[in-house]
């Protein structure tokens, strides 16, 4: 089991009665370093938190108990549900993000994330399609954990989905994107979020045939 440093945040509340924890949301901190991120996530005036934070060297902090509602997703939606904080566990990965010098997530951090997420899934019924990034659930506002995050590696460890390409239907892309889980009210933003996650080599918000093939492959995994 991954060693955990207790770094409690005051920023949490009760989950609604009877709520099933069925989502895992991954973020990057988007701050200059781990100390700044911990300060913010434990500052009562900031009114933000997550359940866990993982530093680049793999050190893992528990900020909020899993049975409590952390404040990490904000205005968000996935598979038609908008109560993302109620039903999810949030993990922050220390990374300066696009504002402060975005960089790849190092091996110790990824290994710690895989160990922690595996433990979390042993405790909660979180399906693979509900392991998401912040950009997936808030495509008009967020881009983390971003195009350098190794989603394929996570899927290979049994955490989340990574598609083989399927038979595309470019005319049905918006409907299929919604069917997979994205809020498509802003289709360009949803397409960009999809590319950040599943086609990070070209992020332009255009639903081309490669995107359609990858989305078809994802839908084949959940059908």
Image (cartoon, rainbow, N blue to C red):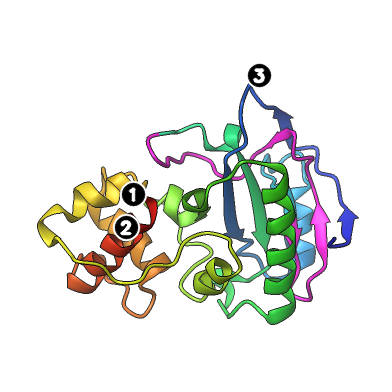
Query: Marks 1/3: CA distance?
Result: 30 Å
Q: Which residues are magenta?
A: 53-80
* Side of 13 where 24 appears, left or right: left
The residue under the point 58% across, 63% down is: 158
- Look at mark 3 in the image and give the residue it sits on: 17
User: Residue at label 2?
Assistant: 220
Seen from the viewer's position, the closer of residues 136 and 220 is 220
Q: Residue furthest left?
A: 171
* Residue 45: quarter of image: top right
Please say if the residues under marks 1 and 3 sit with CB atoms less than 8 Å apart: no
Secondary structure, mark 1, is loop
User: Which residue is at a point 59% across and 58% down the rendered structure image?
Assistant: 27
Q: Is residue 76 left or right of residue 121?
A: left
Dot 3 or dot 2: first in sequence order is: 3
Across and down, in percent, residue 63 comes to: 79, 47
SS under mark 3? loop
Question: Is 66 left, or right, of 28 in this rendering?
Answer: right
The answer for how far apart the CA atoms under marks 2 and 1 are is 5 Å
State the residue at coordinates (37%, 46%): 181
- Label 1 crowd bin: few (<14), some (14–19), many (20+), radius 10 Å: few
Q: Is 55 within the magenta?
A: yes
At which x and y percent is residue 219?
Answer: 32, 55
Q: Is residue 66 magenta?
A: yes
Mark 1 or 3 closer to N-term?
A: 3
Where does residue 90 sit, x and y in percent of width and height?
Answer: 64, 49
Q: Are marks 2 and 1 in contact (CB under 8 Å)?
A: yes
Residue 177: give its label. none
Which residue carries the number 1 mark?
223
Relative vertical location of residue 127 with respect to residue 162 in this rendering, above or below: above
């Amino acid at each position: 089991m991954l060693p955990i440093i207790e770094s409690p945040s005051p920023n949490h509340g009760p989950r609604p009665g009877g709520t099933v924890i069925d989502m895992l949301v991954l973020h990057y901190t988007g701050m200059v370093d781990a100390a700044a991120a911990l300060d913010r996530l434990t500052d009562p005036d900031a009114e933000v938190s997550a359940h866990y934070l993982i530093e680049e060297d793999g050190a893992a902090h528990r900020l909020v108990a899993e049975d409590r509602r952390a404040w990490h997703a904000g205005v968000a939606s996935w598979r038609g549900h908008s109560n993302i904080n109620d039903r999810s566990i949030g993990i922050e990965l220390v990374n300066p993000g696009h504002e402060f010098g975005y960089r790849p997530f190092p091996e110790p951090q990824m290994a710690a994330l895989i160990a922690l997420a595996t433990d979390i899934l042993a405790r909660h019924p979180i399906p693979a399609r509900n392991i998401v990034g912040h950009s997936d659930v808030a495509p008009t506002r967020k881009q983390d954990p971003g195009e350098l995050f190794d989603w394929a590696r996570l899927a290979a460890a049994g955490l989340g989905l990574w598609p083989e390409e399927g038979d595309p239907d470019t005319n049905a892309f918006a409907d299929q994107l919604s069917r997979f889980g994205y809020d498509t009210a802003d289709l360009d933003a949803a397409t960009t979020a999809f590319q950040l996650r599943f086609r990070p080599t070209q992020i332009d918000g255009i639903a081309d045939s490669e995107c359609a093939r990858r989305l078809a492959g994802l839908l084949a995994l959940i059908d």
